[in-house]
Image (spheres, helix red, strand yellow):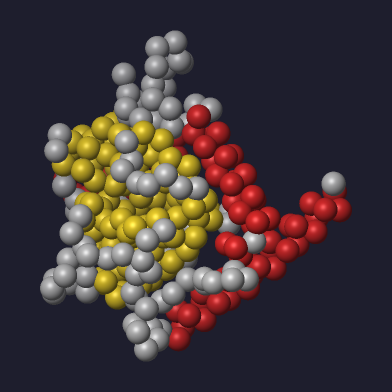
Amino acid sequence: MTIAGAFWVGVLAARRLRDWGDNNRALDRGPGQDGQLALTTGSGSPSDDPSIRRVRARVAERLQGSLANGRGLAATSGQAPRDASDLDLDGLRVGDVVVIEANAGARQGDYVVEGLLRLHEGGITTQVAVIADGEVRRWLIGSHGRGLDSSGADEWFVVEPVADHGLAGEPPRNVQPRPGSARVYALARRGQASVAALGDHGRPSSSRVGTYLYRLGTRDVIWLERWGNEVVMGEGCVVARHAISFLPGS
């Protein structure tokens, strides 16, 4: 068992390094003739290997378990009360409240957490909180310890879902929030993550998702998720962490 486990760890590490190098070279080269930045596909890719799929399924199970064991569950009677000063993005539960202040650059308000996504890529875990204030929907996205575009900055984003973006399949290197828009965002980072989800998050059911971060200037961002052929997009801005606070659900 130990020898077999070590063998597969070595195989996975080698493939991750290969894919990481391919992705970086693709970004350095820029768009090809079709303007697309394609993920590795076809026979022989890591996603076609049954052992890789089994490992990814195990990772997704562990992520789902971490949500089910107190982190991400809706507050229920009988649980120990939580202090607002102890709450952070990675400890949110469905039913908690996210407070966005006026100087955040996003629409201020008190938003209730309706759904949660936990995305794990390498050693980085990204939280996506699906929040609502009446009919207004936003996603709060953040990752501790490293910027989501590998810049080293610990940034959080607040984005508004975009329904009519017109994208499907592999996204291009440059995107517009809507066809014909004058705002064009450039790809800053892409990745593949194992995912666990809880609550009303509005995503397909899958244990794997492609993530893409696009930027326009220093503040404006597009967060994009690819679930198979389906693309989910949110447009918004970088938000200072001190402008976001949390309250435990009742």
The residue located at (45%, 86%) in the rendering is 29
Residue 109 appears in which quarter of the rendering? top left
Place of residue 180 in the rendered image (x, y in percent of width and height, measured from the top left): 13, 73
Vertical position of residue 74 compared to residue 155: above or below: above
What is the tally of numbered marks visible in this picture?
Answer: 0
- Residue with the most extreme front position: 43
Place of residue 62 in the rendered image (x, y in percent of width and height, measured from the top left): 59, 39
Vertical position of residue 68 compared to residue 77: above or below: below
The residue located at (38%, 83%) in the rendering is 31
Question: What is the quadrant of the C terminus in the image?
Answer: top left
Place of residue 156 in the rendered image (x, y in percent of width and height, measured from the top left): 35, 52
Residue 114 appears in which quarter of the rendering? top left
Q: Is residue 200 visible?
A: yes
Vertical position of residue 113 compared to residue 170: above or below: above
The residue located at (34%, 58%) in the rendering is 230
Place of residue 186 in the rendered image (x, y in percent of width and height, measured from the top left): 31, 74
- Residue with the most extreme top position: 78
* Residue nearest the observer in this picture, 152 or 90: 90
